[in-house]
Amino acid sequence: MDIKVMKFGGTSLKNEKTRAYVYRHIVKNLISHKVVVVVSAMGRYPDTYATDTLLSLGSPRLSKEEKARLVSMGEQLSALKVCGELLEMGIRACALSFFQAGIFTDDNYEYASVLKMDSRGIKKKLQHYDVVVVGGFVAVSTHGRITTLGRGGSDYSAALFADMLGLKEVEIYTDVDGVYDRDPRLDNMAVKYDVLTYDEMLNMKSRVLHDRCVNYAKKHKLIIHLRGSFSSSSGTRIQPRY
């Protein structure tokens, strides 16, 4: 079975219009692959289900464990929303819970370290479904408690799922169509890179990709293909060498 891991950020999922672009990418890949879709919480603050919006609903008095449970709701809602809309399109899809996803960590609720991974649950679902949707950023401790992988951790989650499934590449979709030498939304003279090494990407201090994702990909020689949700551009590949 050919499998592809595709991660979509919150701005790509914020409303019906933006999600339509996401579904086009998914449907295109279903011609030749089963797809694991990793999703962030929908939108950015003050969007209703964004991570910072959810945090604003809580209290500073909440424990770190309670805050992790609170913010995990954003990814859970996102995964179930995307799964539901794919089902309405006639696509065989299911949404995994964090307990089924197979990423297990220590008890650091804000910046957890991964201790082990178990691909059996996700592989079993892929035998029966064409698309498996799972929330990024959130994992489960070995003691069965919700943990998080640090802000922006959905990129890291996508790399973990790709490695867990024995893949050589992970696709990460965002609201820009690749890595540029400067912000293309502020400077129309910005130049896009077709290929970067892991170290070049890390040295850029870019916010486009989470450092934990890039470092993990470097260690495991996993190619990151960064693409735009709203574009057909080939994007930027982050890899060992070129």
Image (cartoon, grey):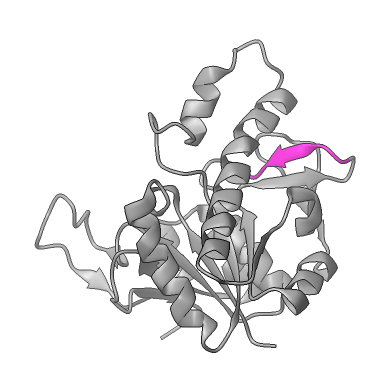
x%, y% of residue 11? 37, 49
x%, y% of residue 80? 61, 50
Examine the rendered structure and indicate whether residue 32 appears above or below residue 47.
Answer: below
Instruction: Please name whichever residue, 149 or 174, is drawn nearer the observer in this view of the structure.
Output: 174
Q: Tell how many labels.
A: 0
Left-right relation of 137 to 199: right
x%, y% of residue 147? 72, 39
Q: Which corner quadrant of the image does residue 169 belong to?
A: bottom right
Instruction: Please name whichever residue, 104 or 23, is drawn nearer the observer in this view of the structure.
Output: 23
**Could you tell me which residue is drawn at 72 percent across and 47 percent down?**
139
Q: Quadrant of the N terminus?
A: bottom right
Instruction: Please name whichever residue, 89 or 141, is drawn nearer the observer in this view of the structure.
Output: 89
**Could you tell me which residue is drawn at 55 percent across and 71 percent down?**
90
Q: Which residues are magenta?
A: 144-149
Q: Quadrant of the C terminus?
A: bottom left
Instruction: Kindly tell me whether residue 212 is visible in this rendering.
Output: no
Examine the rendered structure and indicate whether residue 37 appears above or below residue 80.
Answer: below
Instruction: Please name whichever residue, 221 or 133, is drawn nearer the observer in this view of the structure.
Output: 133
Q: Is residue 155 magenta?
A: no
**Could you tell me which residue is drawn at 39 percent across and 46 percent down?**
14
Left-right relation of 32 to 225: right
x%, y% of residue 85? 51, 58
Left-right relation of 87 to 16: right
Instruction: Kindly tell me whether residue 135 is visible in this rendering.
Output: yes
**Could you tell me which residue is drawn at 64 percent across and 87 percent down?**
2
